[in-house]
Image (tube, grey):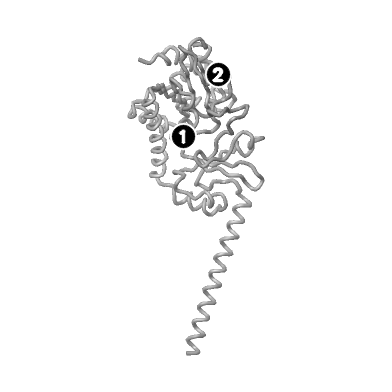
Amino acid sequence: MGSAGSSAKQVLVKLLMLLSGTVFTFLLTEFYLKLSLPYEGLGAARELKQFRNLENVSGLFTIDPDFGFRPVLGTSVYNKFGTLTGNYTLEKPEGVTRLLFIGDSVTARGKIIGAIWKLYNETNFEYWNAGVESFNTVQEVRFYKQYNAAIRPDHVILTFHLNDFETTPVAFLDEDGRLVVYAPNFPAKELNPWLFKRSRLYRLYLGIAKTSNENIDAVIEDTRVSLKELKNTLDRDNTILTVLVLPLLKPYSEWKPGDKFSRETILQILQDLDIRHFDLLNVVEQAMAGGIELCEQPGDDWHPSTAMSDLFARYLYENSLFSVP
């Protein structure tokens, strides 16, 4: 009995030593990753670095579990309806068509909207801008339903970027109080936000475990479902929906395969859902042939210059953007 008891005690000691060693290794690895790669998504997500580097971020954006992050509303920047503050009132004048533009930073910066305004003017239209920096389609649709819909637009124009195949992001404040935002590579409902914030090993695990095409398909499905929800909502309210599909602002031959896939995928989704849309790739090709400056800033393939925005607007005008049968 004494020998058996001694053997059991030795086994227990070895197990405790093994467990302690494992815990120590885990904690050491966690500490190393946090120290050396504090903001890396480690394959699970892509950090939207602009938020961490944004001055006065707390005055502009807030954490919201429904959106990951969203603008602070009721300020000099965004009103309570989630649109950029302007001169319009909630009461719409008779005979005026209320336009609502939703999208990401391209919409928020207003170059295309301004170019459209120059062609159509304000005699018969109001131009409301609900663009939000780095929003994706899932966020935009949710934002519309929760805030923008209160203005009761007659026509919603959604700008789709090729990087808008994303799900609800993960957002939190880091130890220094800076807003940190991540775009997961799979539906956000499949991760634990508390663990994602605190554990780099958890991010690494997700980066390894969530690499299949099924996860990419799930993110695409999130976008498709959101667009369908928006269409159904607007149809019910007798509101027109138009989607502008923005291409990359460089030769198609230089696009990455993923960007080409995104364009083909969104065009197929819009066709399947019977959503009116304009593919603006040909306009970029015409601009390149004419020597037009494409980009707002050199090397930025996402944000159009004023001249490029004018061409987009002219194309939309000539193809009856607001003359819907």
Q: Between residues 244 and 26, which one lies in front from this camera angle?
A: 244
Q: Position of residue 140 (x, y in %)?
A: 48, 32
Above or below, comparing residue 76 to residue 30 in the picture: above
Above or below, comparing residue 23 to residue 92 in the picture: below
Above or below, comparing residue 248 to residue 312 in the picture: below
Left or right side of 67 for 241: left
Label 1 sits on what residue type? Arg
User: Which residue is at a point 56% across and 72% down the rendered structure image?
Assistant: 17
Whole-number angstrom distance, CA of label 2 to CA of label 1? 23 Å
The numbered dot on residue 88 is 2
Q: Position of residue 188 (x, y in %)?
A: 47, 44
Dot 1 alpha-carbon crowd within 10 angstroms: few under 14, some 14 to 19, many 20 or more: some
Q: Position of residue 13 (x, y in %)?
A: 54, 77
Quarter of the image for the C terminus: give it.
Answer: top left
> Label 1, on which residue?
142
Residue 289 visible here: no
Tell which residue pokes out farthest to the top in this image. 123
Label 2 sits on what residue type? Tyr
In this view, the mark in front (2 or 1): 2
Dot 2 alpha-carbon crowd within 10 angstroms: few under 14, some 14 to 19, many 20 or more: few
The numbered dot on residue 209 is none
Q: Between residues 169 and 292, which one lies in front from this camera angle?
A: 169
Q: Between residues 263 and 224, which one lies in front from this camera angle?
A: 224
Q: Position of residue 24 (x, y in %)?
A: 59, 64
State which tag comes first along the sequence, 2 or 1.
2
Left or right side of 293 for 98: left
Cβ–Cβ below 8 Å for labels 2 and 1?
no
Residue 58 visible here: yes
